[in-house]
Image (cartoon, rainbow, N blue to C red):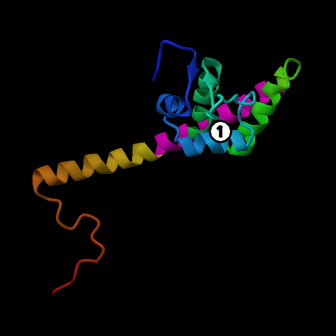
């Protein structure tokens, strides 16, 4: 990414954000940018540092599970200017709570998985792993 200028191509933005060029065009079509993205005389999009910062936030919101419709609503609120900060805060707090719940669920799953890893590791090291959770019940050969 070029660092000597405050303008960035769509390729620069894709590299900096990890979003594909296709995803960036989708974001633009969906109205997720805070401003219309200007174009050069040759028709290429010209992004600035504020666009990059905004896209990094949008990407984190998406990666953390925020639906596009909610990101779009947040963008609309920010674009509309001062006066709706309580609504923006409520939207972010709701998402924060959803992410915290997701983390708690993942932590609970990790605890169970880790317990199985410990059990299997012990049995593999001791040579007693044969038959652990075998899909077939043991046969009675009496």
Residue extending farthest to the top is 4
Name the secondary structure under disc 1.
Answer: helix
Quarter of image, res 57: top right
Q: Quadrant of the C terminus?
A: bottom left
Q: Is residue 107 left or right of residue 73?
A: left
How many badges with numbers are in the image? 1
Q: Is residue 107 magenta?
A: yes
Q: Position of residue 71 (x, y in %)?
A: 71, 37
Q: Position of residue 29 (x, y in %)?
A: 71, 44
Tell me where residue 18 appears, x and y as whole percent.
48, 35
Give whichever of 96, 78 is nearer the camera: 78
The quarter holding residue 74 reads top right
Residue extending furthest toward the front: 41
Q: Residues within 10 Å of mark 1 (few under 14, many from 20)?
A: some
Residue where numbered disc 1 is placed? 98
Tell me residue 105's x, y (percent). 53, 44
Residue 1 on the magenta span? no
Q: Is residue 91 above or below residue 4?
A: below
User: What residue is drawn where x is 61% and y is 33%?
Assistant: 44
Question: Is residue 142 found left or right of 95 in the rendered image?
Answer: left
Chief SS of the magenta region: helix
Q: Toward the viewer: 8 or 94? A: 8
Instruction: Look at 28% across and 77% down and name the residue there.
Output: 137
Q: Residue sitting at 86 percent across and 17 percent down?
A: 82
- The stretch of residues the image draws in magenta is 87-108
Query: Quarter of the image containing the N terminus?
Result: top left
Give whichever of 71, 32 is nearer the camera.
32
Question: Which quarter of the picture shows residue 110?
Answer: top left
């Amino acid at each position: 990414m070029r660092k000597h200028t405050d303008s960035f191509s769509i390729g620069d933005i894709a590299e900096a954000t990890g979003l594909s060029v296709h995803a960036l065009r989708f974001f633009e079509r969906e109205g997720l940018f805070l401003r219309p993205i200007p174009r050069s005389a040759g028709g290429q999009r010209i992004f600035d540092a504020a666009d990059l910062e905004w896209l990094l936030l949008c990407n984190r919101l998406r990666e953390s599970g925020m639906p596009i419709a909610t990101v779009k609503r947040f963008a609309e609120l920010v674009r509309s200017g001062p006066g709706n900060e309580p609504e923006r805060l409520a939207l972010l707090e709701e998402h924060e709570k959803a992410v915290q719940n997701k983390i708690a669920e993942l932590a609970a799953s990790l605890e169970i998985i880790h317990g199985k890893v410990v059990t299997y590791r012990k049995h593999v090291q001791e040579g007693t792993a044969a038959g652990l959770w075998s899909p077939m019940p043991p046969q009675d050969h009496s």
